Amino acid sequence: MESMVNHNKILKQAYKGKKVLLTGHTGFKGAWMLSLLHHLGAKIKGYALVPKSPNDLYNLIDGDQLCTSIIADLRDTQRLENEIEEFQPDFIFHFAAQPLVRESYRNPKDTYEVNVIGTLNILEALKKVNQKCSVVMITTDKVYYNHEWEFAYRENDTLGGKDPYSASKACSELVIQSYQHAFFPKEGFDQHKKAIAVARAGNIIGGGDWSEDRLIPDFIRAVYADKAITIRYPNAVRPWQHVLDPLLGYLQLGQKLDENPLNFSEPFNFGPTINDCVSVEKIITKMIDSWGEGKMEKDKNIQHMKESNFLMLDTTKVSRYLGWDPKLSLEESIQKTVEWYAVFKDSPSEIKAFTHNQIKMYLEL
Ligand SMILES: NC(=O)c1ccc[n+]([C@@H]2O[C@H](COP(=O)([O-])OP(=O)(O)OC[C@H]3O[C@@H](n4cnc5c(N)ncnc54)[C@H](O)[C@@H]3O)[C@@H](O)[C@H]2O)c1
């Protein structure tokens, strides 16, 4: 308990009054991050597209009151550069992306443009920051070339991607690597003062995700409508984790990067314990148990868009160097997720306070 209190104190010291540029602040993870950063006392400028619906978490928590919100496209090079140059951030957390595998099959070009060129635009604009800046780039567990083996991936495994989303995120990492070497090298830190780390997290669950073609939102839409969820890949194993676990890790990474830029300008995996990497079928069974009702059926239409079967992350590095380990077990992550959607269904007017309370309770764990 004492170490956790100290830990929260360290994060407050790191972020209080600091200028943080948060891209993707209107999205699922971005809105939780916005809330966390606000809780820590940061001055936040968000940069993203308009929230897609009134029920988006950003709207539910009155996100506009927590930050200066810039609604603009990552591909608008000039606007992005102007916003970053004008703000002169101490930290950047880059979340904005086209994050869905199936959407990347429908719109591969947009996916590559947003995820690769969008990332490049952030890095170009970083050249206009003329003070120290610590940057955490959010990619994904899907950046690893997937061998479909039963070993968990480590940070030095080969990058790759068999679908456009995964490949676009792997490409964005190559762009980041090249900028780390060509424009922001460790040996030149005293001149450029930029440190860039990469955060690769697994499948995130938690309240407020309404994305199409994502397992938990699909399940919630089905139970709200009293229908069965259709699952496409029952045996696919994924590293599921509650949204607050990796977000706390990203904050710790930013803080360490700021303190010690030369040692932390690297990629880090954020994932659950290996035992909590379970199949789609198992996670839906657990969701049904926790919700108290719900049905699933397996998709018999075999014309799937291909996705990997087996994906687990090794988190030895982040545990050793950041002292980060997930605070929540899979059961607790599911329970927190289910509680959020149950409150939203029954008492939507309480969801802002409830979300804030979930964060507060999590930080006190
Ligand atoms: N949710 C997960 O399970 C998961 C897992 C691993 C990694 N990630 C990564 O985390 C990040 C956030 O994911 P999420 O689940 O919150 O996604 P999301 O779709 O909920 O949010 C995406 C955000 O990016 C913004 N955005 C999209 N296109 C943009 C553009 N052209 N210009 C400006 N902003 C744009 C959106 O407005 C939104 O704010 C992404 O980089 C994603 O790849 C997510």
Image (tube, helix red, strand yellow):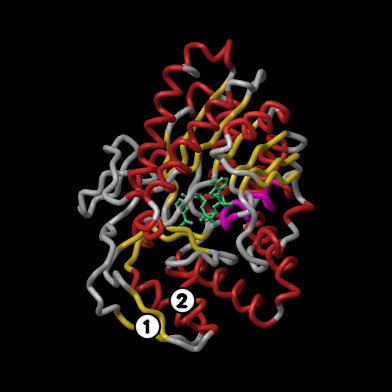
Residue indicated by mark 1: 296
The residue type indicated by label 2 comes to: Phe
| 29 part of magenta stretch | yes
Residue 61, labelled with which disc? none
Residue indicated by mark 2: 219
What residue is drawn where x is 72% and y is 28%?
A: 86
| 181 part of magenta stretch | no
Which is more toward the observer, 51 or 262?
51
What residue is drawn where x is 38% and y is 54%?
A: 104
User: In the image, residue 28 lies at what x, y percent?
Assistant: 57, 58
Quadrant of the image occupied by residue 299: bottom left
Residue 178 lies, with reference to residue 304, above or below; the image says above
CB-based contact (under 8 Å), mark 1 and mark 2: yes
Q: Earlier in the sequence, mark 1 or mark 2?
A: 2
Give the extent of the magenta segment: 27-37
User: In the image, residue 360 lies at what x, y percent?
Assistant: 70, 58
Residue 82 lies, with reference to residue 241, above or below; the image says above
